[in-house]
Amino acid sequence: THLPFAFTGIRLHATGAHTARIHITPTTPETVSIDVADVDGRPIATVAALDLRPVSRQQIEAARGGTEQSLFRIDWQAVPDHKRGATSTERPWTVLGAVPAGLSVDTVPAESLDAVEGAPTVVLLPLPGSSGADTANSVHDLTRDVVSSVQQWLTLTESSDARLVVVTRGAVAANGGDDVTDLPHAAVWGLLRSAQTENPDRLVLIDVDGTLESWAALADVVASGEPQAALRDGSVLLPRIVRSPAPAVTPAGGTDRFGDGTVLVTGATGVLGRLLARHLVTAHGVTDLLLVSRGGRDAPAAADLDAELTGLGARVTFAACDTADRAALDALLGRIPTDRPLTGVVHIAGVLDDAAFETLTPRQLDRVLRPKADAAWHLHRATEGLDLKAFVLFSSIQGWVGGAGQANYAAGNAFLDALAEHRRARGLPATSLAWGPWAEGGMAAQLAETDRARLTRAGMTPLPPDHGLTLFDTALTLDSAVLAPVLYDTSVLRARGTELPHLLRGLVRGPVRRPTAAGSARAGGVSGPSLTERLAPLPAADREKALLELVRTEVAAALNYTSADGVDPAKGFKELGLDSLTAVELRNRLGKATGLKLPATLVFNFPTPAGLTARLLADLFPHPVDEPEEADTARAADAAGGEPDGRDDTDPALIDALDVEALIRLASESADS
């Protein structure tokens, strides 16, 4: 009764099609009929009538998620003892460095990864605590060291099931009111969340409080299969993204949010910076703006922005300043008039320098961390003694979910979220907003089409500017240090089945289910016989054809092609459009579909779909497979329905007409018979 339409007379038809054509025919002024067919005209679904109903603006907002449906937070949920993983002690763990007291498993110490002997199933890497007041430099030093270690480990164990367990301390605020006591460790969480996205089931991230009880519970977490957890006094806490409660009052502007003094905005001449500067004046009554960017008044958009804001009655000062330079920042703040003191900070600045985790360099880390994390830290230290009303940080949801190819960006944003928690624990104002993609502007606008398609497949819908600004206002009314304004499409999340990251499973009602058989044949989530078992009964030539079709299908999915028809088996992956990030995604897709442990360099070593298929075929069938006997072939043809009209479905011309699902189904039916 809450939908603006109603379906009647729905009929579904069995088909393996992945591409559909939809025909809509008006039948009355308020009714249409719908026919869905594949590219060959075979019916997929029909709807006898779609009755349209009037819809209100409120219903449209609710369908878009609504303000109260688009703000999220991380909830750390306690795991009952009886639901913990069963500790496995079949093999001792290898511990890099000193062995922590309290571990409940046998251990073998090793000074470094080079000194690891044998084939351990678990390697434990406890990170040293950060010391000293130079937090900005510590973030760079620690993240560089962790990237180097994890890159080395991934290379050494690329064909094994071994897991690296990285242990931090004081990196997350897992209990209400907790302080984040080690901000560089918090940056590591964002860094390794991205590494986990690119390397599923290879890394575990755990934050401990240092108690013996927590170290004893560490093995339970590793055995449970959870990729992230916090341990507090022996209790296991798991992170889950949940919707934030709706505000008790309607969000509104006003100078009470930012005070009646000067508000400093970094990244002010970018698209989001200009949008926010205008909103601060029109919705929050801010009359004095200090707009900071690399170009200052010489930035291309500065003159128009100045004219617009001045026309709205604001006093605007542009400044070219590197806020990651503490001396330059102090000089800038010293020039703020004493009769209009600084009362608000909005930190938007940031840059991208994306790369697959295995190829991430120290230079790329430093380039992204500097305007994001370094600048935020210096803004915090330079203003902590001032009477600020607001300290708002523009973070990113990638710091939570670990965007593929954005480990450096995720690290910087995780630092911002942790800094907000740290300030709140000290009684200072702070709100970090972990934004999803914006429809106009923001970092998502700098992404390639394949990267934006990856965000869509992850269930994120770009935020319209007006909706984003409403979420900005709403977040300031909530008593939360960190919130994520994101438009999540829960139907997309639900369709990911068991591939849905643990962090997002709280957003899907009911148990997480495996994908349907048709979808999971590609995704590797299908139950029953493995791909090898289903391909083995096929003749060698048809086995190779079926596997090539699978490769082409996964290449098309990674590149966001409409179908596999555009994937030429002889074309190079680079010519087809694959970059380092889509190469990682393709490697992971094929790993799930085949059950193989595939190296990160897979598509570079075998740079065409045909060459890659040959490699996978050799891995799946390392030993010769007996060809099916004639009787078995006849039974397979009979099972496929070829007997009544005298056809032989094993005829090469007919087999060539089958798609990969039909070939695998034919093989499965033959094996069952």
Image (cartoon, rainbow, N blue to C red):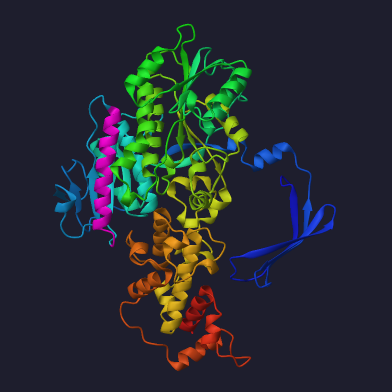
Q: Residue 470 or 237: which is nearer the viewer?
A: 470
Name the spot of residue 654 as percent of width and height, x first: 55, 85
Determine which quarter of the picture holds residue 350: top left
Say if the magenta span includes residue 466.
Answer: no
On the picture, is 247 further left or further right than 36? Answer: left
In this rendering, the answer to whether 81 lies above or below 140 is below
Q: Residue 52 or 555: which is nearer the viewer?
A: 555
On the picture, is 250 further left or further right than 637? Answer: right
Name the spot of residue 384 as percent of width and height, x first: 37, 17
Q: What residue lies at 43% left-to-right and 69% top-to-bottom?
A: 609
Label count reads 0
Q: Residue 623 or 75: which is nearer the viewer?
A: 623
Residue 94 in view here: yes
In the displayed orientation, state which residue is furthest to the right.
28
Residue 236 in view here: no
In this rendering, the answer to whether 321 lies above or below 71 is above
Say if the magenta span includes residue 155.
Answer: yes
Determine which quarter of the picture holds residue 625: bottom left
Q: What residue lies at 45% left-to-right and 73% top-to-bottom?
A: 548
Name the spot of residue 112 as percent of width and height, x first: 16, 48
Instruction: Give the extent of the magenta segment.
Output: 135-159
On the picture, is 312 further left or further right than 384? Answer: right
Q: What residue lies at 35% left-to-right and 35% top-to-bottom?
A: 369
In this rendering, the answer to whether 417 lies above or below 537 is above
In this rendering, the answer to whether 518 lies above or below 183 is below
Name the spot of residue 289 as percent of width and height, x first: 52, 18
Q: What residue lies at 37% left-to-right and 54% top-to-bottom?
A: 200
On the picture, is 571 further left or further right than 224? Answer: right
- Main SS class of the magenta portion in the image: helix
